[in-house]
Amino acid sequence: MKIDKAEVIVTSPDRNFVTLKLTTDDGLTGLGDATLNGRELSVVAYLTEHIVPLLLGRDAHNIEDTWQFLYRSAYWRRGPVTMAAISAVDVALWDIKAKAAGMPLYQLLGGASRTGLLAYGHASGKSLNEVFDSVNSHLEQGFKAIRVQTGVPGLESIYGIASNKGLPGNEGVRYDHEPAQRGALPAEEDWDTRSYLRHVPTVFEAVRNEFGPELPLLHDGHHRMTPIQAAKLGKSLEPYDLFWLEDCTPAENQEALRLVRQHTTTPLAIGEIFNSIWDYQQIIREQLIDYVRSAVTHTGGITHLKKILEFAAQYQIKSGMHGPTDISPVGMAAAMHLGLAIHNFGIQEYMKHGDKTNAVFEQSYSWNNGMLHPGNKPGLGVELNVDEAGKYPYATAYLPYNRLADGTVHDW
Ligand code: EZ4
Ligand code: CO
């Protein structure tokens, strides 16, 4: 079974997505997600110029060998662009292998370890009232775990707050929470860590009082704190029993988390911008985190993320795969198959895609009573509707960035 055709498809329903489609000589097709929010075309170039020519004629069954060949033969290893490109190849090959076997992909990964995947959604609001409304609306949708992001007094526009502007063509319809914005330049947001550290615990206190002790609550610090600030936040959130505090520090400096860990029992999750096992080596070995945030899409595919998660399992660290809307339905399906199969599944982030995206990517995964399931179609269970995809050409979009009050650029 040889790879006969490799196409890179860029489409922008609601937002930009990059998809790799492989076709074998016996007519099977496989899809892989290569979307890198705000830097999509760099992955398109990496795939088109440097990977597609290497794939044609290769045995589609040799997934591990293809992974090692692409990773090692480049010489220049790792990095978000390279690893997103390798991920797309890897997932497309798993899709093909599972279709060839006539099985849903999770069967090839060891079979189901559970009946469904606990998923969390994104509640947010500028004011406490808006936060409560958003939590209520998520409960009505069936979510059994909820991330809470809140506005901070004095800051106009910050990460994690859904805008009521909506998407182009769907103005006025809230779309939780889409940070990238179409336009020629990145939007500028505000930041002040001291105000944030003062305000956030008051919001979690109010949310706990309103919604009770049982609901799992999560929060994303989005890389803004120093280790000692993160330690302080973790400690001040302890009474509200968070499921996790995410990306509290930038963590390029893995040792930073030692200090956070020494001061707080709030569980820590990190890694959505990591791209290989080497980003995790120290923090897993030293048990500095509780959840691995990597997405299949950004961490070298199922082949590589499975290795990270198996390493994590030795230390009782669980999965908490990244699942924002910038992971395409192809990437989400890959996460669901992997999450269903591994023993140390923790939780899956799930932001529902918009209607246009759902029309481009025909899905067989399901959302029922707060739980996700990848479905039982052979392969990943996602197909790309080429006619729908063709309606939405690439549109320049950037993630925002941050400045402090004095104009200093800060981590976003
Ligand atoms: O900002 O995926 O936990 N989720 C997140 C996301 C990220 C976006 C960046 O592309 O932090 O909202
Ligand atoms: Co995050």
Image: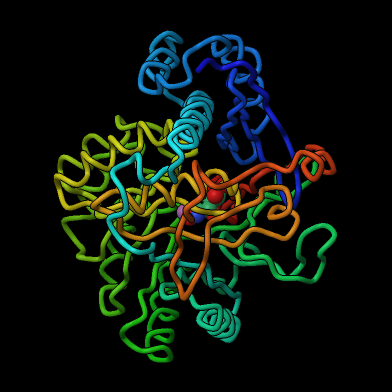
Q: How many marks?
A: 0
Front residue of 359 and 376: 376
Please tell me in which quadrant of the rendered image residue 64 appears: top left
Q: Is residue 354 left or right of residue 97?
A: right
Q: Residue at x 38, y 12 (%)?
A: 72
**Rendering coords of residue 195 (x, y %):** 48, 68
Front residue of 408 and 191: 191
Please tell me in which quadrant of the rendered image residue 219 appears: bottom left
**Rendering coords of residue 376 (x, y %):** 47, 53
Q: Is residue 90 above or below residue 185?
A: above
Q: Residue at x 43, y 52 (%)?
A: 336
Please tell me in which quadrant of the rendered image residue 147 appears: bottom left
**Rendering coords of residue 374 (x, y %):** 47, 54
**What coloring was used for the rendering?**
rainbow
Instruction: Decide if residue 156 is in sight here.
Output: no
Q: Residue at x 58, y 29 (%)?
A: 28
Q: Is residue 328 above or below residue 50?
A: below
Instruction: Decide if residue 215 is in sight here.
Output: yes
**Rendering coords of residue 152 (x, y %):** 54, 71
